[in-house]
Image (cartoon, rainbow, N blue to C red):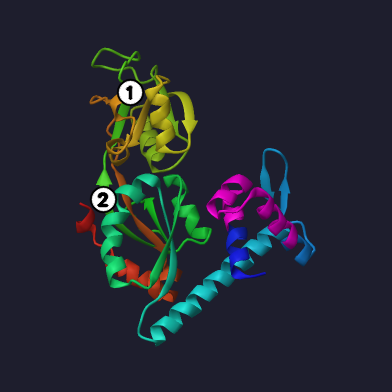
């Protein structure tokens, strides 16, 4: 059970999808299946329950996931400490960000960090922004996430930018024509959860409006796709709208709700900051002025 096998196993635990994991680690589907079978034979336990549609971790698989995560973290910490002992900080750290954040925020922050610490390798995971904080519990060292300005126990946060939550409709808007909109009748495409949803829900509550929900989806890209198709009106952070390939098929509704802005920043755990010199070095390199 080598470290590369553990990394692949953690990837499968994170994705719960053999196809995506095969692509991520450049393996054939049969090679990944053989790796799982070898692991299960080695420990004489079933790690996954799978059928044609779903993959689920067994309780034994969860125990191995925790073991693999802690083992790789301890190995990375040992390498980091050895690097410090030789006066050259080296090793790796795992960073999570949405595709939008990867394209707009990370290049500005990471450029100087890479120059200052060329021996540190960055492992970048991408996914839905709403999954960012959960990724901290799944082994990521630092995440780019939607953050509240209030303190959170056990977490360290650096908010680096704020962006308004925009109301967006298809270019051929068939949902309203007048300046005064009855928001109880407009079909809405909403995020299933996350900061945007919380802020929009708060606005509806304050205005005593029961929303007409057409669909609840994960990810801002899915919201924009459904809006562009004419399914309803949606709400997305301005940062996402500015970088969307669908921008020509969508219009901003100026008379839309004005909920609290969407705050974006870096987040890690107090534990990571106290234990990892690499995370501390990265944390010190974050400069909000680089992003604004």
Name the residue that disc number 2 marks.
161
Is residue 24 one of those drawn in magenta? yes
Q: Residues at badges 1 and 2 in contact (C-beta under 8 Å)?
A: no
Residue name at image x 37 percent, y 78 percent: 89
Q: Secondary structure at mark 1?
A: strand
> Residue 2: percent from the left, percent from the top?
63, 70
In the image, is 69 to the left or to the right of 265? right
Residue 155's place in the image compared with 273, above or below, is: above
Residue name at image x 24 percent, y 24 percent: 255
Q: Residue 200 sits in which quadrant?
A: top left
Residue 86's place in the image compared with 110, above or below, is: below
> Residue 26: percent from the left, percent from the top?
56, 53
**Res 194 seen here:** yes
> Residue 272: percent from the left, percent from the top?
44, 69
Name the residue that disc number 1 marks.
169
Query: For the N terminus, which image quadrant?
Result: bottom right
Near mark 2 (Cα within 10 A), the count class, few <14, some 14-19 or many ≥20, is: some
**In the foreground, 246 or 201:** 246
Residue 33's place in the image compared with 172, above or below, is: below
Residue name at image x 31 percent, y 14 percent: 176
SS assignment for the magenta stretch, majority: helix
**In the foreground, 285 or 267:** 285
């Amino acid at each position: 059970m080598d470290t590369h096998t553990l990394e692949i196993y953690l990837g499968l635990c994170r994705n719960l999808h053999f196809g995506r994991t095969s692509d991520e680690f450049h393996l054939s589907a049969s090679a990944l299946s053989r790796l799982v079978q070898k692991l299960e034979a080695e420990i004489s336990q079933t790690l996954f329950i799978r059928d044609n549609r779903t993959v689920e971790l067994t309780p034994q698989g969860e125990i191995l996931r925790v073991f693999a995560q802690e083992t790789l973290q301890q190995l990375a910490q040992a390498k980091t400490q050895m690097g410090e002992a030789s006066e050259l900080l080296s090793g790796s750290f795992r960073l999570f960000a949405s595709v939008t954040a990867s394209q707009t925020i990370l290049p500005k922050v990471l450029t100087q960090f890479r120059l200052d610490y060329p021996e540190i390798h960055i492992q970048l995971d991408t996914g839905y922004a709403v999954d960012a904080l959960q990724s901290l519990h799944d082994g990521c060292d630092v995440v780019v996430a939607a953050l509240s300005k209030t303190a959170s126990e056990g977490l360290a946060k650096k908010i680096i930018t704020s962006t308004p939550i925009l109301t967006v409709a298809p270019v051929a808007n068939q949902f309203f024509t007048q300046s005064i909109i009855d928001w109880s009748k407009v079909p809405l495409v909403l995020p299933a959860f996350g900061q945007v949803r919380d802020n929009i829900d708060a606005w509806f509550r304050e205005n005593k409006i029961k929303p007409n929900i057409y669909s609840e989806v994960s990810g801002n890209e899915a919201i924009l796709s459904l809006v562009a198709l004419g399914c309803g009106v949606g709400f997305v952070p301005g940062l996402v709208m500015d970088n969307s390939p669908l921008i020509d098929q969508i219009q901003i509704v100026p008379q839309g709700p004005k909920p609290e802005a969407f705050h974006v920043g870096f987040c890690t755990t107090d534990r990571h900051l106290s234990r990892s010199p690499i995370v501390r070095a990265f944390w010190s390199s974050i400069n909000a002025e680089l992003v604004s």
